[in-house]
Amino acid sequence: MTSENKKAALTVNWSKIPTLNELKKHLEMVKREISKTSIMFSLKGFEEISYFCHNTNQVSSVKSLYNENGFETKRVIQDPFSHSGPTVACPIGFPSNLYKRFDELRRFNRWICRLHVDIGKDKNGGIISAPHIEQDPLFHPFTHFREAFMKGNVVRGKVALELLRYFID
């Protein structure tokens, strides 16, 4: 990251891991805040939260897993509402260059994207990761703000989970 981008990035706070319900409530708050504007938003990316279970409650293990696989675990560029807990991100390039084609990512083919993951806890205290794919704000700051934040054009669900498994396995 350049020094200019470091100013825009927020330090990731690993001290409090939210529950899955807290993550869902946070996304609901983001939807409410966005809907207060006079512009109509689609919010497609907020509909489905799927997550990966890490089968551990050790924060240091999960943080190391992401760090070892090229994810930024210390400072991440965020949207104006930030996130309710720890989050990691990793550039994945142009979706058309991935190991296989995903119809859900076709509209993203003109942008460098990132895999952005919110970290939470399941009801048993195990750590989970809730991924989504969006335009990378490091390379496309205005597009990220317009498409991912304002329009809600992010990809969650099966595709995001498959890519997360691919990048951390």
Image: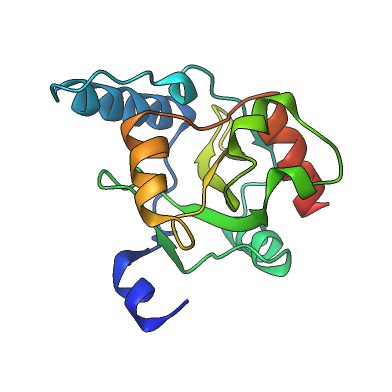
Count all numbered tags in the image, as a single digit. 0
Q: Which residue lies most toward the bottom here?
A: 3
Seen from the viewer's position, the closer of residues 148 and 94 is 94
Does residue 34 sit above or below 98 in this rendering? above
Q: Residue at x 77, y 35 (%)?
A: 162
Does residue 111 sit above or below 49 in this rendering? below
Seen from the viewer's position, the closer of residues 162 and 40 is 40
Q: Position of residue 134 (x, y in %)?
A: 52, 42
Q: Residue at x 46, y 19 (%)?
A: 44
Q: Position of residue 39 (x, y in %)?
A: 20, 23
Drawn side of residue 126 relative to residue 21, left or right: right
* Residue 93 seen: yes
Drawn side of residue 106 relative to residue 21, left or right: right
Q: Residue at x 67, y 55 (%)?
A: 93
Q: Position of residue 108 (x, y in %)?
A: 59, 38
* Residue 55 seen: no
Drawn side of residue 71 relative to residue 43, left or right: right
Q: Position of residue 97 (x, y in %)?
A: 78, 49
Q: Residue at x 40, y 59 (%)?
A: 77
Seen from the viewer's position, the closer of residues 138 and 80 is 138
Drawn side of residue 116 relative to residue 106, left or right: left
- Dividing the picture into quadrants, the one containing residue 72 is bottom right
Figure colour scheme: rainbow
- Dividing the picture into quadrants, the one containing residue 33 is top left
